[in-house]
Amino acid sequence: MRRIMLAALALCVLAAPAHAQSSTGRLVGTVSTADGVVAGATVTVKDNQTGRERTVVSNDDGTFALSQLEFGTYTVTITSAGFKTYTASEVKIDVGREYSLNPMLEAGNINENVTVVAGADVLNTTNAELSSTVSPRQITELPLNGRNPLALVQLQAGTASNANNSTSINGQRPSATNITRDGLNIQDNFIRANASDFTQQTPSTDDIAEFTVTTQNSSADQGYGASQVQLATQRGQGEFHGGVWEYNRNSRFGANRFFNNAAGSFGPNSSQVRAGVARVGDPVAPRAFRNFNQFGAKLGGPLPLPRFGEGGASLVRNKAFFFVYYEGLRDRLSSAFLRTVLTPTARQGLYTYVAQADDPTRGVVRGQNVTVNLFALPVTPGTAPAGQTLPLVPTGINPLIQSRILDPLPLGNTSEAGDQRNTTGFRFNQKADTDRNTFTSRLDFDLSDKHSLNFVLNFQRETGFLPSFDDARGFSTIPSASQNAPSDFYVGAYRWTPSASFSNEVRVGTVRNFPSFPRNPEQPNQFFDFALFTNPETQFLFQGRKTTNTTYQDSASYQRGNHALRFGGTLNTFTALRLNDGGILPVNTLGTGTNTPQIATGTFTNANLFPGGISTTDRNNANALFAILGGVVSNQAQTFNVNPDNSTVFVPRRGFEQDYAFENWQLYFSDQWRVSPGLTLNLGVRYEVYPSTRERNGVITEVRVPEGQTAREALLDPNGQIQQVGTNAGGGRLFKTDYNNFAPVLSIAYAPNFKNRMLSGFFGGEGRSVIRAGYRISFYNDEFLKASSGEGDQNPGFRLSLARASLNERAGSEGSIATPAVTVPRSFAVNNAQFNNFAIIAAVDPNLQVPANHEFNVSYQREIGFQTAFEIRYVGAISRNGTRYNDVTGPVDITNNGFLADFLRARSNLQVNQAERARLLASGRTQAQVDAQL
């Protein structure tokens, strides 16, 4: 196995950071006459954009092939003594696809010319790939909201998508899709659940020339997925071409949302009008503002180079070409949100309840709103936990709660939320602005007929606001979280064509991304959490990650007779630095608990204090409001993390940090054998290795899985242990490397040429129809990093979330959680004791296998004229070894363990209780009397 790895490295040693997929295409064909094939014909292929030419000679069986042609249109000229010159113009070479051209030469003088306009290839007569290319015209002319050409992927046959799920291609998982730009994978390889929809590099309709979507049976040189989406950056040409643009979308021309309109407008008695912050007639929830602008410019053309040495012109022309592009995005957007706030009286501790019965003595009727001062009621003092002094019972609003919670609380403006007695609604618009600047450039150099270079650079800088991170908290028009997403993309390719039969390309590239999500408001020393109304403080803290995709690739093609051989290798390296400050600050829960002061049942049933009686719901809400305003802390939670440089101690208020790395090795070989002009066999094999994910600092734990045990058995073993990662696979690895990943890539394409009149009429004659069939196994990254690291995160060890429960403390003077000791390894028994038997542990199968898709199809294509073809196909796929989560504690046999019988008895008791409650209420008793009796 070590020799295999070294062989792969030898294939890739000339490269540095990309994927085995490049942005080139291929031209194949057979030169023939009415009497048979023509050997020795000269085939000259000229790039219509740059003028560069390549020449090959047809083999003894008339076949020819040119690999690694840049995408675009070409003019193909074929000459042979005794025959007229054949010229095919506008031959369209697509990214990652083959074009089949089968010219029929006519006898005559070589100076005579027969010209045809070829256009795009209508039939695929060379392999069983199911692919289509989205052309430059389609990209630029089809309407796209956001100008991202990847939206057109969903229009391809076999794709399915909706608002709740990521795009699936031929029913496979989204993670089985590989998206590349100029040969480099541009997906988020940390989270691949939406791999078919999201890319860290955002392409645009004006910097992408075209892209090819292969939904099944890709050629052997394409890996890291089953479906392939290959994008190619625009390139310069022999003439200058450019453009400028500006797109605008403005809410001025849009309608307001239904619920915003339903909120109505402010009247003369509205509290906002009286406070001077609104005018009579202003909408309570105005139309969400949006002003979306996308603008930019592009230019491409020839790039004169200085000539060195004596003789000739001072500038060398038509040897270098450039393309530059800039696009800016400014999206000023706001979204409507609904929150719950306290009424002005409730903020003072005055609670309003609904009387449950008539009380003539005190002048209260059923259904009447009655207001009481919570701080004037008798309250049980609660108890102090062991070793603590019993704090005073709150007699008024806690000063810290006043400044942190009540002062930032806005006045209500809608009745859509709340009970309108103690709580009400507040509807407002919050910013969701986005700014993005993108710069792209491409340089192509034709050093000679045998050597060429190209470089692509792309830089993106994106910033914006993220309202969703507020988690339904806060009232600020500016969300608590922002996004900073710098992204850098570099790729270079060197192509060497020493002869007409051999070409080699080394592709080098890297993609670096650092999406971070900083907190906008000032970070406090602690947070408060409570129910009843919306918390004005959000609890979001900084998080982010820094990812790098680096690829080394070498791919070659060799034509020998009627065999077109392709072979090469790829090494992809991925790193991900994960950062998260979530939970590092204490979160104090405000509310009543076992030991806290609270309004007792005897107080609520006292008719002098609560005339007319108070419902259970109002009792709970009154106690909740009393605890919040009084600053009563009943629970406290905090998360502790280690410093990766010293994992033996926890550091309070330090963020979570993990450094992951994994790789992907690929080797491939394929032989396209043109058995005859109408029959082509494709025989290929791929070998892929996904070395195990590693946490390079060792700050993650795992459940020890002894030899001879499964992960399930280890989890259910009462004597099990949690240890530092690497116990099961070694070297900080989360699982063992799966080496047995050989994948066949087989297909056949048969273009019949029947002489029988009936069959010829049905199949359309030579080159008018094709029958194809193929089979391939594709290996792919099915959330290797996120799935395995996510399981490890659930195990305590180097990250520990602790709580202090049953407290009786006050906001501003609350205690703190003692910094725990790092206990690794730890037994299941110790773990259960620390978390009161509610600990969650997880294990990764040490023998995790690489997921594989088995793909097969059979199809028939028939050209029907007008550059149109009819096709009928069968497409099938089977997925094996996909990653998944299993809860080993279930299913539980509730029939034989007594749980089902207990449940049925409890349900019967509940039904009896409900019937008795209904009977007592019908007899005229009050809710309070019924509650007391039952």
Image: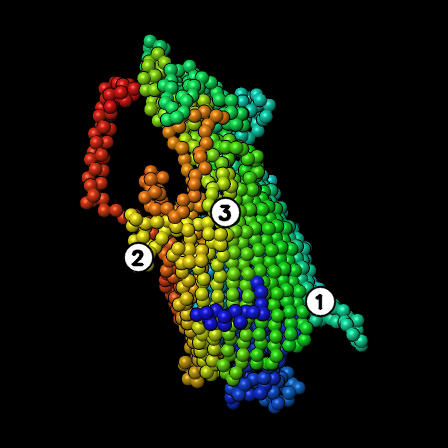
- In whole angstroms, how far apart are the C-alphas of marks 1 and 2? 66 Å
| The one of 299 and 579 positioned closer to us in this rendering | 579
Q: Upstream in the sequence, badge 2 or badge 3?
A: 3
Residue 885 spot, x, y in % from top left = 36, 52
Q: Amino acid at mark 1?
A: Pro
Q: Amino acid at mark 2?
A: Gln
Q: Residues within 10 Å of mark 1 (few under 14, many from 20)?
A: many
Q: Residue at x 61, y 84 (%)?
A: 42
Q: What is the residue that sits farthest to the top in this orientation?
A: 361
Residue 835 spot, x, y in % from top left = 36, 39
Q: Secondary structure at mark 2?
A: loop
Q: Residue at x 42, y 73 (%)?
A: 746
- In whole angstroms, how far apart are the C-alphas of marks 2 and 3? 32 Å
Q: Is residue 756 visible?
A: yes
Q: Which-is-in-front pick, marks 2 and 3? A: 3
Determine which residue is flagged by label 2: 709
Q: Quadrant of the N terminus?
A: bottom left
Q: Amino acid at mark 3?
A: Asn
Residue 308 spot, x, y in % from top left = 77, 72
- In whole angstroms, how far apart are the C-alphas of marks 3 and 1? 56 Å
Determine which residue is flagged by label 1: 302
Is residue 531 shown above or below 220? above
Q: Secondary structure at mark 3?
A: strand
Q: Residue at x 34, y 22 (%)?
A: 615
Determine which residue is flagged by label 3: 646
Is residue 106 shown above or below 717? below
Q: Secondary structure at mark 1?
A: strand
Q: Residues within 10 Å of mark 3 (few under 14, many from 20)?
A: few
